[in-house]
Image (cartoon, rainbow, N blue to C red):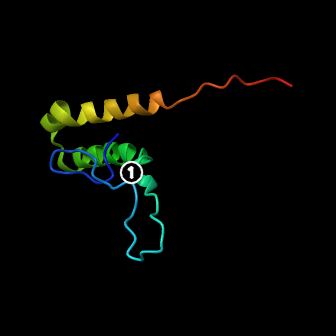
Amino acid sequence: MFPWESAATGDEVTPQSSIPTDPYAEAVRIWCRDREIHLSADIAYAVWQYWQTTGDDNWLCDYGAEIILDTALFWMSRLEWHVKQER
């Protein structure tokens, strides 16, 4: 997974909750920190768009293809097989 917000190191830096300015308000959970799985597809799509736009085959072979492949493997790991039940 790619971070929703990242530091220069690539580490996730999105806070787990908001810090309320009102002393009587409760902190609000920031779910995108833990549920940002859609970003992986966005990044893979951007890689493909970059290659289509630039035609940079060296970059695609050295970096881009690995990102696309690893993204596909990530999505495969999220699958759950459900056997179709006949009626």
* Quadrant including the N terminus: top left
* Disc 1: which residue: 33
- State the residue in front, 6 or 51: 6
Q: Quadrant of the C terminus?
A: top right
Q: Residue at x 23, y 44 (%)?
A: 11
Query: The residue tagged with tag 1: helix, strand or loop?
Result: helix
For residue 21, side relative to residue 82 (left or right): left
Quarter-wise, where is residue 62 in the image?
top left
Residue 78 image point, x, y percent = 49, 32
Question: Horizontal placement of 41 versus 6: left or right?
Answer: right
Snapshot quadrant of residue 44 = top left
59 displayed left or right of 65: left
From the top left corner, tell me how far across and down residue 46 is, in percent.
29, 49
Q: Residue furthest left?
A: 58
Q: What x and y, as percent, mark residue 10?
A: 21, 45
The reply, left or right, for residue 37 in relation to residue 83 is left
Q: Nearer the viewer, residue 82 or 11?
A: 11
- Residue 78 lies, with reference to residue 47, above or below; the image says above
Residue at 32 percent of width and 30 percent of height: 69
Instruction: Using a 10 Å C-alpha cutoff, classify the residue at mark 1 as few (fewer than 14 neighbours), some (14 to 19) or many (20 or more).
Output: some
Closer to us: 35 or 19: 19
| Residue type for callout 1 | Arg
Residue 68 on image: x %, y %:
31, 35
The total of numbered circles placed on residues is: 1
